[in-house]
Amino acid sequence: MGNLPLFLLLQLYPVLVLSAPYVFPDKYYINCGSDSPETQQGGRKFVGDENPNSFSVASGRPITDTTNQQSSSSSVLYQTARFSSDPFSYELDDISDRGLHVVRLHFFPFANLGDALFNVTASSKSLLSDFSVGNTTSFPVIKDFFVPITSSKFKINFIPANQSLAFVNAIEVFHVPNLKDNRTHLSPAGSMGLYQGLPSQLLRTVHRVAFGGQPQSISDPTVVASEWVADTDYMVVGNWATNCSYQQTGRLVYDDQYLLDNEIYNAASQNFIPDGVYRTCKEVNLSGNQSSNSLNITWHFNVSKNAQHFVRVHFCDIISTSANLVQFGLFIYNNFTQQINPYLYTIDMAAPFYLDFVVDSNESDFISVGVVAWANSTVENFAYLNGLEIMEFITEPGLEIEISGSKRNNLVYIIVGSVAGFVVICCTLLVAFLLFKKRRKAKALEPMASYGTLPFGGASPYIGVSSKSGNPPPVPNLNLKLKMPFAEILEATKNFDAKFLIGEGGFGKVYKGTLRNGLKVAVKRSESKHGQGLPEFQTEVMILSKIRHRHLVSLIGYCDEGSEMILVYEFMEKGTLRDHLYKLQGNPEKSSSLSLLAWRQRLEICIGAAKGLHYLHTGSDGGIIHRDVKSTNILLDEEYVAKVADFGLSKSGLLDPDGFSTGIKGSFGYLDPEYFRCLQFTEKSDVYSFGVVLLEVLCARPAIINSHRKEEINLAEWGMIWLNKGELEKIVDPSMASQINPNSLRKFSEIVEKCLRPTGDSRPAMLDICWDLEYTLQLQQTAVHREPHEDSAIDSSFNMSSRPFQRLPSNNYPVEKGDVPMEKDDGSDTTESGVFSQLRIDGGR
């Protein structure tokens, strides 16, 4: 829109009117399960629901905390509750202010109420589904919703699930100004115009984030949007980010809205957002960093896929030295950017304002938000953000219940009749299943005589498929030869005995098992709460059934009977690489070195993992991108041979240059920073992640730690700081620092630097990394005299045809002849290992 001249701003000043603070209405505030009122901060008077005035409550029983173990809040709201094993509801009467209302529900799990599982509905929509507080929290759980109310009555229903309980400690319903329509509508692909119909939507609060403050929550019960958390856990890109706070005393300048260019910009109202949100911000400043034309901070917020979200972004210029001297960019996802000039929205410094958007997540499970500072000689070169709210549009239908007189009896009859019918059906199906199983018993699956006769990682040690084989697999092309019956897996793990539990990851729990032929296996059983599910399961089966390599974990079998999704792998005796580098002391932010691995062993492990990744990247049909390379996905067998594992997030096939990733895939600390700009994975993204693993191996510390020294938090950034100083040896794991040949460390440092370059095009291929790591190992084994002007680097730019490298045979994917037995031999005796052993130490390649 351009800069607004100061004289025009002064002409507009009479249009601007200072706003009055938001004042809470007199009703409705309910102290559930209580017979006495309670006045809270902000002047809200909660009425005990035993003595209702402007509302009624149907069913439910009051309960009081008799243990005297009050919550961290001194409020008596959390010492009583209303609960029931039957549905109950609150109905509000005589609602005079129609329009948007905040509906706030308070839950505090005293007396084991945390075990309750229930649903909450209102306005025929589901506010909470299968909701449970849990018994571990010592703080109240508060859920906020925006609900448009168009009639004089409003009912909130609490419905137990699975023969459990429902409960609530306190309820607030109060009128707030309506959301304005015609907000910018966008998706991961970019702008979609203006959104119509926003004031009629039901919204649930997903995130309220305050930027730049201490890593603790901001809570202010005297304002409308009261509960906020710090941005620390959401920031994914922010090398130059700093926390800023308002140094002046007194209140901020709360202005109303004014009209400019036929658009209404929103100024914040007092008592709506905590002052603390606007008094701090996260800033990125170009000053002193003129080598970059733009610097940005990026945050990622988990959201539901294929949902619409209301996003409100809060700003308050507490940094500028004078008005009208700052412009910067706000971006949402990668394809929408809006120029921010605070003095188009307000004419005062330290004046809060906000911008609203409607954002479709589509297939993405996150919303990416960031600010970018632009180099511009006419303005101050910084960008900032104070606060962010994300609310999801509620579309799920909810049950409206009637709990009075004969209607309640009818509901009971319906429930009883439904349960009885369900029991009859279950019994019939059980009998049919037993008869079917008896008929199939004669055709039970027979184990093969010896696993040793199978191809390496080839198939299940069982011929045929389970009794479910008459049904199609979850998706086409699953390898049915690998399918295993659930009964065999139960037998191998002793019914998933807890003493055989060896790990837990993104897919589920991992158990050690022994098949009937004596083969030891690792059994990974899916659990829905871990977030990964059918797509990851299908991906891993399809990929691992096609590939085999000495440095990739082999899939022995899989099971998809009923709701079970189970993967069976070869058992890796020595566990994960991380297990041998450092110990997490019950806290992923704290670690201590415990490695007994010598430098030579570490290099051999890195070489093995690099070979496995090179094999993935160079297959036919575009190869495979792993997308989650990290030290816990590199496993070690009994001889410390490294094997890459966990292909649930992998992607095969040629890259679509116009195709963007639809969700954050991978693990923070290992993610390619270029991915956050283009939202697309390439094989060079795996190279970056592998560079972080190399630093883990060298330094014996996690990729992300909690540290008061900002530069130490991210291992990749920390390592590059010392690399640029030429002093990487200062952060080497002390347990083996004395073992490393300086030439070997220098070459290893070069590999790390290449892998962690900011752009994928400048990073090496995994094949070059294999060569360089082998050379690093040779340097470790052989003392090399070098003149001061010489360098130990290997030229990685020479033509592939000049390399004495065996052409890898390929069916679906290439297999190294020296690594696994092949059905077809090309007659060559040259192996990759043989080639590396012939390198001249003083000349590299």
Image (cartoon, rainbow, N blue to C red):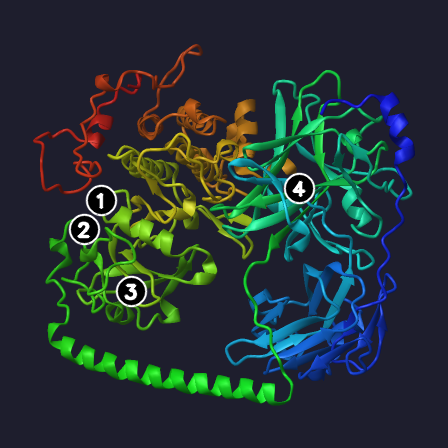
Marks 3,2: beta carbons within 8 A: no
Residue at the top extreme? 789
Mark toward the viewer: 1 or 4: 4
Cα–Cα span, label 2 and label 4: 55 Å
Mark toward the viewer: 4 or 3: 4
Cα–Cα span, label 1 and label 3: 22 Å
Q: Secondary structure at mark 2?
A: loop
The residue where tag 2 is placed is: 458
Marks 1,2: beta carbons within 8 A: yes
Mark before the other along the chain sequence, 1 or 4: 4
Mark 4 residue type: Arg
Mark before the other along the chain sequence, 4 or 3: 4
Mark toward the viewer: 2 or 4: 4
Query: Residue 331 versus residue 738: which sits nearer the camera?
Result: 331
Q: Is residue 159 above or below residue 549?
A: below
Residue 589 is left or right of residue 621, and the answer is right
The residue where tag 3 is placed is: 513
Specify whether residue 558 is in view: yes
The residue where tag 1 is placed is: 548
Mark 2 residue type: Gly
The residue where tag 4 is placed is: 183
Mark 3 residue type: Gly
Q: Could you tell me residue 487's position as x and y percent?
A: 25, 71
Q: State the quadrant of the C terminus.
A: top left
Q: Could you tell me residue 123's position as x and y percent?
A: 64, 66
Marks 1,3: beta carbons within 8 A: no
Cα–Cα span, label 4 and label 3: 56 Å
